[in-house]
């Protein structure tokens, strides 16, 4: 996950500050030196990193912070505020056409950045907000690009406009706009062609589309995995074509995060969205304050709630029924299996924990105790049970356990351990009395883990 190394290094710097009763000026400077090194290692632009720490030092040194009751926390707050400011203060949004029926968005970027999938993800995100999107297939050069777009768009139930045999992206964009106006679409997303590197023909094509179709939003799609190169690409596109915002893709990968922290400061254009996974729903509006909180290991509850609402396929009635059963100690293996499936849809246990306040700071220690493979083992154990055994754990005698172990391909000791942990979790839930409100127990290492 992006920012993990940065988060760890920043926490180490703050940890040393927390070990001191009162901070001296040299303490702050030493900590900020570590912060600057952490930013540089995360591939943040050198000038940005330098200005970042300089700004914090000016606010910290010589002010109340050195006399505060908890100066270490004040330094963390200053770093948080500066991170938010660096990434744009407030979350930016698309420009919508006042008085016009169709708002246009042109996606551009290098080949491999993920424009085609991003076009569909954006359409799906706008669909959630009541916007009806049409995607114009203007990548006429890459083999099977239009077919790929249609396949992905079909999954999201989004319509694609293309002209068979046409090699003129400008014509396609113009006709797509006319079609969008006449067929009641409120958004037109233009998926343009990319290149392996920036060249004049690509830039001229984008300019021609803008000259023939009124483009309100020109969004550059950049791969966060490319680090500082992503910022250089953003700068060149902005200078030659003019962009209104940025979409960062693959922010869930091993990206060092420097692009997210540098692009606004270097290019002056905000990050509007971020791609955080391969699924079509793994696409979020970019909130600088939430991202800063996650970078500092302080959690992100709002994003967790939004993620749950978007991914959890469970009705309020089902949720209440599970809570009621848990309160009576009747939470069974079917409920456990459901909780595991729902947790997977939210990115797994580690992903959920990283968004919880307090746990983000301790995540490296917690992760060492979490084995996601164990969760797949427990799922295999439950899948090897009969429907009657899942509904009534008391049926599990030694003979049945041996059969289950064989079916799951696991040692009998692992099956026994899981069933024992599950029984302990049942007792714990009963003690809670089911007082969890709206929500349900997520499957943990061996039983219900209430979130």
Image: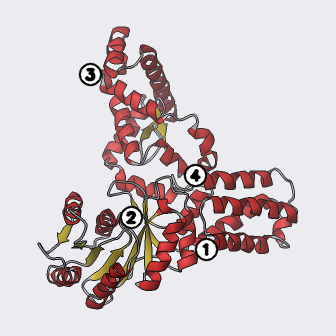
Cα separation, mark 3 vs mark 2, equals 46 Å
Q: Residues within 10 Å of mark 1 (few under 14, many from 20)?
A: some
CA neighbours of label 3 inside 10 A, class few (<14), some (14 to 19), many (20+): few
Q: Is residue 379 left or right of residue 39?
A: left
The relative height of residue 433 versus residue 145 in the rendered view (above or below) is above
Which callout, 3 or 4, points at the residue further toward the start of the chain? 4
Disc nearer the start of the sequence (3/2): 2
Assess whether mark 4 and mark 1 are in contact (beta carbons under 8 angstroms): no
The tag on residue 113 is 2
Location of mark 3 (residue)? 386
- Which label's residue is closer to the chain start, 2 or 1? 1
In the image, is 371 to the left or to the right of 120?
A: right
Residue furthest to the top in view is: 399
> At 17% across and 83% down in the image, what residue appears?
175
Earlier in the chain: of badge 1 and badge 4, it is 4
Which mark lies nearer to you, 1 or 4? Answer: 4
Residue 4, label in figure = 4
In-front residue for pair 166/99: 166
Q: Which residue is denoted by mark 1 in the rendering?
A: 85
């Amino acid at each position: 996950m992006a920012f993990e190394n940065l988060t760890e290094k920043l926490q180490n710097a703050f940890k040393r500050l927390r070990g001191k009763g009162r901070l001296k000026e040299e303490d702050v400077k030493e900590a900020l030196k570590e912060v600057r090194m952490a930013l540089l290692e995360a591939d943040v632009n050198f000038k940005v990193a330098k200005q970042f720490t300089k700004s914090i030092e000016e606010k910290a040194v010589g002010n109340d912070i050195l006399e505060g009751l908890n100066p270490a926390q004040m330094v963390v707050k200053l770093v948080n505020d500066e991170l938010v400011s660096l990434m744009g203060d407030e979350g930016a949004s698309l420009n919508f056409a006042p008085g016009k029926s169709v708002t246009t968005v042109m996606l551009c970027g290098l080949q491999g950045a993920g424009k085609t999938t991003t076009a569909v993800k954006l359409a799906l995100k706008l669909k959630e907000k009541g916007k009806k999107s049409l995607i114009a297939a203007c990548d006429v050069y890459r083999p099977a690009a239009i077919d790929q777009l249609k396949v992905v768009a079909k999954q999201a139930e989004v319509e694609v406009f293309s002209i068979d045999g046409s090699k003129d992206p400008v014509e396609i964009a113009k006709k797509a706009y006319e079609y969008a106006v006449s067929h009641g679409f409120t958004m037109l997303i233009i998926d343009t062609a990319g290149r392996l590197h920036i060249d004049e023909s690509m830039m001229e094509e984008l300019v021609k589309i803008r000259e023939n179709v009124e483009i309100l939003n020109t969004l550059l799609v950049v791969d966060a995995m490319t680090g500082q190169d992503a910022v250089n690409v953003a700068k060149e596109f902005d200078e030659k074509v003019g962009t209104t915002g940025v979409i960062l893709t693959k922010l869930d990968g091993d990206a060092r995060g420097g692009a997210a922290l540098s692009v606004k400061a270097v290019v002056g254009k905000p990050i509007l969205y971020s791609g955080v996974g391969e699924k079509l729903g793994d696409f979020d509006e970019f909130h600088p304050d939430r991202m800063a909180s996650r970078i500092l290991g302080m959690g992100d509850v709002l994003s967790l709630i939004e993620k749950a609402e978007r991914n959890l396929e469970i009705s309020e009635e089902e949720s209440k029924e599970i809570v009621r059963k848990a309160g009576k100690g009747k939470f069974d293996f079917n409920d456990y299996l459901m909780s595991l499936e729902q947790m997977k849809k939210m990115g797994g246990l580690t992903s959920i924990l990283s968004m919880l306040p307090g746990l983000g700071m301790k995540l490296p220690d917690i992760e060492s105790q979490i084995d996601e493979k164990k969760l797949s083992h427990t799922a295999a154990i439950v899948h090897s049970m009969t429907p009657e055994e899942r509904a009534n754990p008391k049926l599990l005698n030694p003979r049945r356990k041996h059969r289950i172990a064989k079916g799951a391909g696991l040692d009998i000791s692992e099956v026994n351990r899981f069933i024992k942990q599950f029984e302990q979790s049942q007792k714990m839930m009963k003690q809670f009395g089911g007082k969890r409100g709206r929500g349900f127990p997520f499957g943990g290492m061996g039983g219900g883990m209430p979130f």
